[in-house]
Amino acid sequence: MFLRQPESWTVEEDFCQLIKSLYGLCQASRIWYEVLDTALKELGFKRLIVDRAAWTSPTGVYVVAHIDDMVTAGSRTEIDSIKQY
């Protein structure tokens, strides 16, 4: 993703490449999904085959994401540790 520089910048190139996505850009939701998917996989979650926005852990905790909201189901201690991570 590229962004035109502000006129006050004195960099010679015409465009700057974004290192992070910005909220409100078209790709922001895709980047957020990738970050969430990576973090949950690091915690041992697996994505459900029938829904790409739902994950389950071996201990029976479920996480479902919708846009920028998440719903969790499972034991309170495990959910708290996931939230803390």
Image (spheres, rainbow, N blue to C red):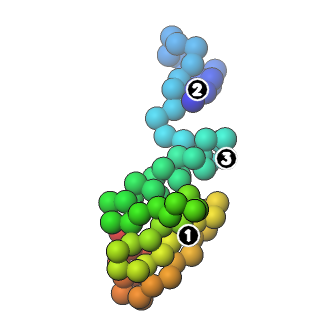
Horizontal and vertical percent position of residue 75: 41, 88
Location of mark 2 (residue): 2
Q: Of residues 84 and 53, which is closer to you in this image?
A: 53
What residue appears at the point 40 percent right and 54 percent down from the top-left corner? 38
Label disc, if present, on residue 24 of the rendered structure:
3
**Mark 1 or 2, nearer chain start:** 2
| Residue 84 visible | no
- Residue shown at 41% from the left, 63% from the top: 46
Please give the name of the residue rendered at 52% of the width and 16% of the height, measured from the top-left corner.
Answer: 10
Q: How many angstroms separate mark 3 from mark 2 (CA)?
A: 14 Å
What is the x, y in percent for residue 30?
57, 47
Which mark is drawn over residue 64?
1
Which amino acid, by three-letter code, is at mark 3? Gly
Q: Judge whether 2 appears above or below 44 on screen.
A: above
If the image is split into quadrants, where does the N terminus sit? top right
Q: Are marks 3 and 2 in contact (CB under 8 Å)?
A: no
Identify residue type, mark 1. Val
Label 2 sits on what residue type? Phe
Label 2: how many residues lie within 10 Å, few (<14), some (14-19) or many (20+)?
few
Q: Quadrant of residue 53?
A: bottom right
